[in-house]
Amino acid sequence: MNQTTAAILIIGDEILSGKTEEKNAKFLISELRDLGVSLRLITVVPDDIDQIGTTLSDLSKRFTYVFTSGGVGPTHDDVTLLGVCKAFNTKMHRHPEIELALRNYFGDKLQETHLRMAEVPQGSIFIKVAELRWPILSYQNVYIFPGVPEFFKQKFTAIKERFRASEFYLKLIFTKQDEFDIADHLTQVAKDYAQVSIGSYPVFDREDYKVKVTIESKDSQATESAFNMLISLFDKNQIVRSE
Amino acid sequence: MNQTTAAILIIGDEILSGKTEEKNAKFLISELRDLGVSLRLITVVPDDIDQIGTTLSDLSKRFTYVFTSGGVGPTHDDVTLLGVCKAFNTKMHRHPEIELALRNYFGDKLQETHLRMAEVPQGSIFIKVAELRWPILSYQNVYIFPGVPEFFKQKFTAIKERFRASEFYLKLIFTKQDEFDIADHLTQVAKDYAQVSIGSYPVFDREDYKVKVTIESKDSQATESAFNMLISLFDKNQIVRSE
């Protein structure tokens, strides 16, 4: 089945060195899930043009959407857009419409450094949203967001409906059997229902169950059938709950 | 300067689909920082042998250490070790010493699925630690940890001192100037002190300062000099604090 897929690219030395806690991937994981988009990769890279470029070039080819976070301010360590240029073999240029908007916004307080915010890769698309002052920048299937969590959230939320895909169907089984006892059953059902993702997650800090089994796909019937097959294979007396 | 570098590879559909919150990368970011190891990449991938293999092969060549989290249990979705085989062009085999330990531990309750825990890539190294029942598995510069946070933490902590490198020196400046006003100063100092990482982090939810500037390297003198140069370039009346 052709799924709508996504990757997240987080950019910033401050995340890797522990100076700033990453929050945007966590937010986006939950949003993409609700939207029915299958998130396939998250990568966190430093403020390095080559690494951003190589990564973006790869991700853009492999996934339906790529979402970036960080590195879009006016200082020397903001190199995401140079990375986009590297990835897509294009150059920065000053976008006349954004320049005009900046001149109007800053008026006689305008500095040369403000105008850096109008420098974008040639070929960029601006997505204008009525409720936001500044448009959202994209390049082909790459959507470029700021790292500051409140702005990231605001901008993503403003355009999220354009990414909506069909929903996921998820069933759960909680059992007191341990993973060793159900491993062969899981293997069998995973083989019989290749389009359904079966996950097995042991817990060690609870009294009520030992393993949570997840059964998931975009096909409600296949999900239901795989679930029923697992229920029939597991030890019924050990199943604590299923839903 | 040759630095000790690291990458983290998080393996698991459950992280990407939002079923489980990732905690090991967060823990390891802070640990590696304290150890003086420069973390350069974090990647989260699904339970997919090819993708784990390709990623591990790449990371193992580029960084001093690679730490993996997840995918090492006995069920069909635990494919990290198969990924290691793919990355290093080796095969799984049953390790006699681990098999014996498993037979002793499980006694007459031993099942065939238990013995899967003795299946490891040929060429693996077991790191034995007195206080842990099971050894820690590694392959060349790749260290393989379980995804369950309490076990990850326990195992990493048991061997962390072997990764210790020289410490980082960090200086900070908090200013009321905004990024546009200091951008050129930052660029200049970043150019003059190429071995020092200069970071600029605007905040929008505080009254007391607008930008936090970080100055960091493994060379205390270069860090100090870059810090002093920035202090001399910034507007003194707008510096709230430096440390």
Image: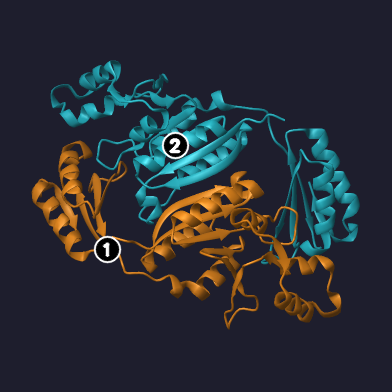
Chain colours: A orange, B cyan
Front in this rendered view, residue B49 or B182 = B49
Q: Decide if residue B232 is on the left or right side of residue A34.
A: right
Residue pictured at 83% horizontal, 67% vertical: A112
Query: Where is mark 2, residue-wise?
Result: B68
Q: Which mark is residue A218?
A: 1
- Asked which secondary structure carries label 1, the reply is loop
Q: Residue A84, located in which quarter of the rendered image? A: bottom right
Amino acid beneath label 1: Lys
x and y percentages locating residue B192 in the rendered image: 84, 43
Q: How many discs appear?
A: 2
Other-residue count near label 1 (Cα within 10 Å), few / some / many at <14 / 14–19 / ≥20: some
- Asked which secondary structure carries label 2, the reply is strand
Q: Decide if residue B231 is on the left or right side of residue A7.
A: right
Compared with residue A125, is residue A193 higher up or lower down, i.e. above or below? Answer: above
Which subunit holds the residue at mark 1?
A
Residue pictured at 22% horizontal, 39% vertical: A179
Compared with residue B221, is residue B45 higher up or lower down, i.e. above or below? Answer: below
Other-residue count near label 2 (Cα within 10 Å), few / some / many at <14 / 14–19 / ≥20: many
- Asked whether the residues under marks 1 and 2 belong to the same chain, the reply is no
x and y percentages locating residue B225 in the rendered image: 86, 40
Task: Give the CA separation, mark 1 to mark 2.
Answer: 29 Å
Which subunit holds the residue at mark 2?
B
Amino acid beneath label 2: Thr
Residue pictured at 77% horizontal, 62% vertical: B179
Residue B69 makes an appearance in the image: no
Residue pictured at 59% horizontal, 57% vertical: A88
Q: Residue B134, located in which quarter of the rendered image? A: top left
Q: Residue A166, located in which quarter of the rendered image? A: bottom left
Q: Nearer the viewer, mark 1 or mark 2?
A: 1
x and y percentages locating residue A56 in the rendered image: 55, 53
